[in-house]
Amino acid sequence: MKRLSSSASSDASQGSPTKLHGEEYLAGGSNGLPGADSSAKKLNDWLSLSETCRVKRPREFFLPVRYEPGYRYPLVVWLHNNGFNETQVRQVMPHLSTRNYVGVGVRGSLAMDASGHRFEWSHTPAAVSRCEDAVWQAVDDACERYSIHRDRVFIAGYGAGGTMARRVAFQRSNQFAGCIALGGRMPRGNAVLSNLVSTRNLKNLWAVAIENPELREEQFEDDMRLVANARLRLDVRRYTTDDEMMTEVLRDVNAWMMRIVTGAPEDPTASEKWATTPVGFSSN
């Protein structure tokens, strides 16, 4: 697998966003593009959530190649891993797809350095609440600036960002088309499964690197027991590598999301790729 080394750069001092292979990156203060679907501004569900969510946490937008204002795009809300920042969405989105999505990166809740370039996620009740506010506002802003399909909003994250993405998604599962975690853990505490009935309908993808030192086998099994006991809807994909931030993993994530967007049945080749082979007792 090819490691996505470009995503390792989280220094916000690198300069203003630039174009890469035709993608347009817009900082949080940009004005967006004219001609976005006016109906997107009637964000009934999102506005009800974000009416009081005025936390001005920095965020970064990604636009696909040849952005078409007349087409309502799926939105990917990206939560970076610890030690990075919201600009990670720049490096991740082109490896998901250069055409299929609008993306927005949200900054973590705690600074890890004095210069304010690296951030991490805190799971205290107050920090979680602020993160939820920041996510709703990011979605609100994306829908106001660009042409977004409100029923096709995905939340995704890497490492600790994947854990936080799940925590946020579990609280408002009916607002997301799906949740993707690259690594990370199943969140616990703070009544994370208080909306269990609706959470069971949320589509989840968990990409796990088998050799990831931050997720030991016993931790993985413990999380899987929690998933089974809660009867959550979870698609688990395990990779024989030590890191989930790989181009092949991101291609699988794109295929998983596009099946939800298009309503297409699962790709037969993907089924064969992930299928298990029955073993009879005589083979033991």
Image (cartoon, rainbow, N blue to C red):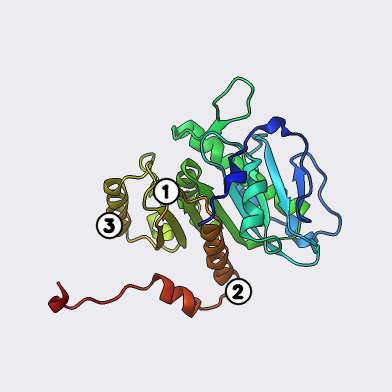
Give the residue at the far right of this rendering.
Answer: 34
Q: Is residue 269 above or below residue 206?
A: below
Badge 2 crowding class, 10 Å Cα cut-off, few under 14, some 14 to 19, many 20 or more, is: few
Describe the element under mark 1 as helix, strand or loop: loop
Residue 202, given in percent of the width and then of the height, sits at 46, 61
- Work out how far the residue at label 3 is from the one at label 2, CA to CA, in angstroms: 31 Å
Tell me which label, 1 or 3, sits earlier in the chain.
3
Q: Is residue 47 visible?
A: no
Tell me which label, 3 or 2, sits earlier in the chain.
3
Find residue 229 and name its label: 3
Badge 1 crowding class, 10 Å Cα cut-off, few under 14, some 14 to 19, many 20 or more, is: some
Q: Is residue 264 visible?
A: yes
- Identified by mark 3, the residue type is Asn
Badge 3 crowding class, 10 Å Cα cut-off, few under 14, some 14 to 19, many 20 or more, is: few
User: Which of the 4 image quadrants contains residue 80?
Assistant: top right
Residue at image position (58%, 40%) is 8
Residue 275, given in percent of the width and then of the height, sits at 37, 73
User: Which of the 4 image quadrants contains residue 153?
Assistant: bottom right
Q: Nearer the viewer, mark 1 or mark 3?
A: 1
- Identified by mark 2, the residue type is Thr
* Residues marked 1 and 2 touching at CB (< 8 Å): no
Give the residue at the far top of this rendering.
Answer: 114
- Work out how far the residue at label 1 is from the one at label 2, CA to CA, in angstroms: 32 Å
Describe the element under mark 2 as helix, strand or loop: helix
Query: Total number of numbered labels?
Result: 3
Residue under pointer 1: 242
User: Which of the 4 image quadrants contains residue 163?
Assistant: top left
Find residue 262 and name its label: 2
- Identified by mark 1, the residue type is Asp
Residue 28, given in percent of the width and then of the height, sits at 74, 40
